[in-house]
Amino acid sequence: MDEKVIASEPVPDFYRYWGKAKRDDVSPGPDYHLLAYHSLDVAACGWLLMSEEYPYVARIAETLGIDEHQLRRLFVLFLCLHDLGKFARAFQGLAPGLSAQLVAPMPGMSYEVRHDSLGFWLWRESAELQDVFAKAFNVDQKQVRRLHQLDTWLEIVTGHHGQPPQYPGNIRLLDHFDKSDIASAVSFSGEMLRWWLQAEDLGFLQDKALNKELKSQSWCLAGLAVLADWLGSNQRYFGYCAQRVPLKDYWEESALPSARKALAQSGLQRRPVQGFESIRQLFPFVETPTPLQHYAISQPLVEEPQLFILEDVTGAGKTEAAMVLVHRLMSVGLADGLYVGLPTMATANAMYGRMAECYRALYPQSERPSLILAHGARHLSAEFSDSVGWGNQQPSDVDYASGEASASAYCNAWFADNRKKALLADIGVGTIDQGLLGVLPARHQSLRLVGLSRKVLLIDEVHAYDPYMKKLLENLLEMHAGQGGSAILLSATLPYQMKRDLIAAYAKGTGKDMSALDSTAYPLATQFPAIAEPQCALATRPEVARRVEVQRLNGVDAALALIAETVAQGQCVCWIRNTVDDARWARQQVRNILASDEVVQLFHSRYVMLDRQNIEADVLARFGKHSDGAKRKGRVLVSTQVVEQSLDLDFDVLISDLAPIDLLLQRAGRLHRHRRDAQGNPVDSPGEADQRPPAVFYVHSPDPQDDADENWLDGQKGTLAVYRDLGQLWRSAKVLFSRGGYRMPEDARELIESVYSSATSLITPEAIEEASFSADGDRRAAASMAGFNMLDMSKGYTRKSNDAGWGEEVNVPTRLSDASVSVVLVKPDGEGSWRAYAEHPHYPWDLSTVSMRENLWRQAEKALSSELIKQMADLQENHNALKWKRLFPLAGVLDSYYDQEVGWLGGPAEAGNGQ
């Protein structure tokens, strides 16, 4: 733009403060960007984000009961004030010597409080700043301090670095601000109030009753403030300007044009959706819809956010039915995209493959929607990642202090992490953890909620969550409903009480009362709210209706003998063990009895991503839907729970360690899953029966005798360490073995409720019941811990929403029983530095990551020398993708901590969750 020097009037002092500064002296252009202009850059991005091109303003304005243009103007007014804390001389001293035109550093004034909190403190403590607001509102200063909406708005915008600002403590403002700094901040604020505030806004901002609604929407507004700050800090579009020009000239000639360019490349615009016509748009192979899919096609939709719960047998087409509902919800304007949350990385990888085949059909052919898998970087392509925007790193500004990164640094770190980037894609697939972090006091949780807003939240295998995660999920559903989001939950085995709790949480978010939803039918589809019947009993797909025989194996010797017999007959077999250690031990024993290493394969979750994906691909090729007899013949897979959900696997013989009934039914879904001939080749002819011997599900378990005591499961201590509730395990064994088998879907509901319902007819032995009391206490404690950890969303975006305090995401657990951490393995690069374990042109760090229990990491960390620790810290500093990861160097004796075939070996054996 043509820069116009201010000469006709005295130069306001607020032009003497920098807002952005270069990291080095070699980059071209000015060394700094004036604070007033950066404030307008961010405001211009907020102005566009709140336009009709984006999906935010209409819903928030409707909830608040105000005009969209008014909401847009108010949001931009307060965004202009988001960096008031940078007027502090303590902050300005972080980059001394930039120019004689700027305020000079003040000796003895140290930067001890972050600038975001300093801005909020300035509002709370400065009589001068309160007075300029009072004059704008035509009230006295005491009255303006009682306008709690102003606190909410200032917390929203000053919390733009991903956490709400801290409240004033014992530190005086004048320890950080010179009096002239406060005067400059007041002068700039007055300019913005005169510029944006209109008479019609005063009534809204002074209405105490509306503050409750504003707090409910403050989470989304805070996320938009983060996005605006990231966009407005991107030097590719917002070049530094140190020349003083009138604010309105800068707004019109620089801020707005630059913001249009930045937003055009962001990938956040609302895309047109292809109208729904039939299921074959998404799945051309579907000739005749299943009963569940027919329900998804024909069930009337309400004209508001809604929840669906689809319960049907494994293999009944739940995913296809859910995607039909997603398409219909999008086509009527109730959603713009989709996030699929799954319990594990393996299930996310499997779901990604299914989404990749159909997601483009949700949009017109001219559109290029983004699809991001949060974990399986092998699937990512440059086309997908670039379509999300910010595909490449932007130049970073100088960091403000230790532990306080600049907006551009935070932005780079976020988009270097595909787990997070998936939330802002049109279609994202990952574990549910990324969604759950939205209701925990983790940095940038508000950005996660923005990513989920206007998306359908599709959660598969919803039964798989423990009490801690279930409580968080309830909070997420409540919040998602409050943001105007629809949700679809899928399960083959969902206990009745859990279903009611999830519906109740969603209903609370909508503000509607939950009607009686007490059908015991199975399969079952539930809708809330609904025009027609809220619950619909369904038939299942004939091909998955079957009887499964159940036989008990009394010990590992019996399991090993069965495996040897199966291999001798040329069939394939899988043994699902409950811990990694048990799986490794069993693999070696099977190799010993077969005298062969070639036919036995190990699969669990404690592999580096690259190796895990290679193993998973091989497992799917050998045992998946399209595998033939030659690939399957005489093969053995020893696995943990990673094969339990979502992977489309089919075994001739299946053995499982004892587990709760719902998980056993899930595992049994991998037995004779597809029709095959006697040699194991797929049978494609309609109506042709499976030609293998009858399906028998073998369960490795002691006899559930009526007089069993607390030592009943001592032979499977790993199982008890994982599942803890001895009563549930005993009842699971009892109901299965007493029947000798079961029919699906007829027996599914009774089997599940026999184990989980308080009204079960099974009489649990007294000693086992007593042993279960501690497990029940653990469940209550886990739910209580979730309540302690999660945010109280009703309090709005404020530090008061959580008493435990806010932290980085690595400090806020989404899984209590898991307590896992992500560790990136690195190797010497031969030139005195380090490279990722995985050699990959685009995603080496992602593919070098292994997930493990935190106690295993602590044990391994002790082996690192101080020099190695320093080298790992330097590596993190140079790579944004590693910022919040642990690093472990495979060099020297430490190289033996990981084996490509066996997985992570470092530290002593683990007695916890085997996944």
Image (cartoon, rainbow, N blue to C red):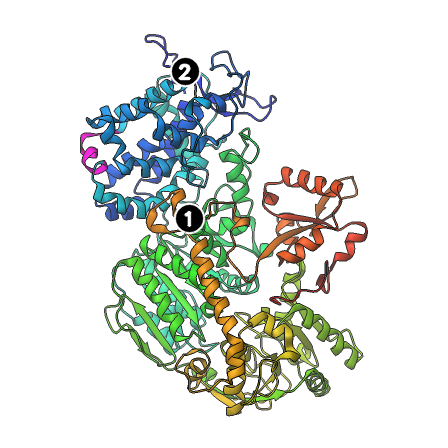
Above or below — where is 25 with respect to 199? above
User: Marks 1 and 2, how far apart in space?
Assistant: 43 Å
| Residue at the spot 75% in from the left edge and 57% down from the top edge | 897
Compare marks 1 and 2 and give the one earlier in the sequence.
2
Q: Is residue 200 magenta?
A: yes
Name the kind of residue labelled 2 in the image. Answer: Arg
Q: Which mark is residue 244?
A: 2
Name the kind of residue labelled 1 in the image. Answer: Asn
Q: Secondary structure at mark 2?
A: loop
* Magenta residue span: 197-205
Q: Residue 837, can we see it?
A: no
Q: Nearer the viewer, residue 708 or 55?
A: 708
Above or below — where is 472 with respect to 656? above
Q: Are marks 1 and 2 in contact (CB under 8 Å)?
A: no
Q: On the image, numbered disc 1 is attached to which residue?
A: 802
Left or right of 557 in this view: 782? left
Quadrant occupied by the N terminus: top left
10 Å crowding of disc 1: few (<14), some (14-19), many (20+): some
Q: Residue 170: percent from the left, percent from the top?
A: 44, 31
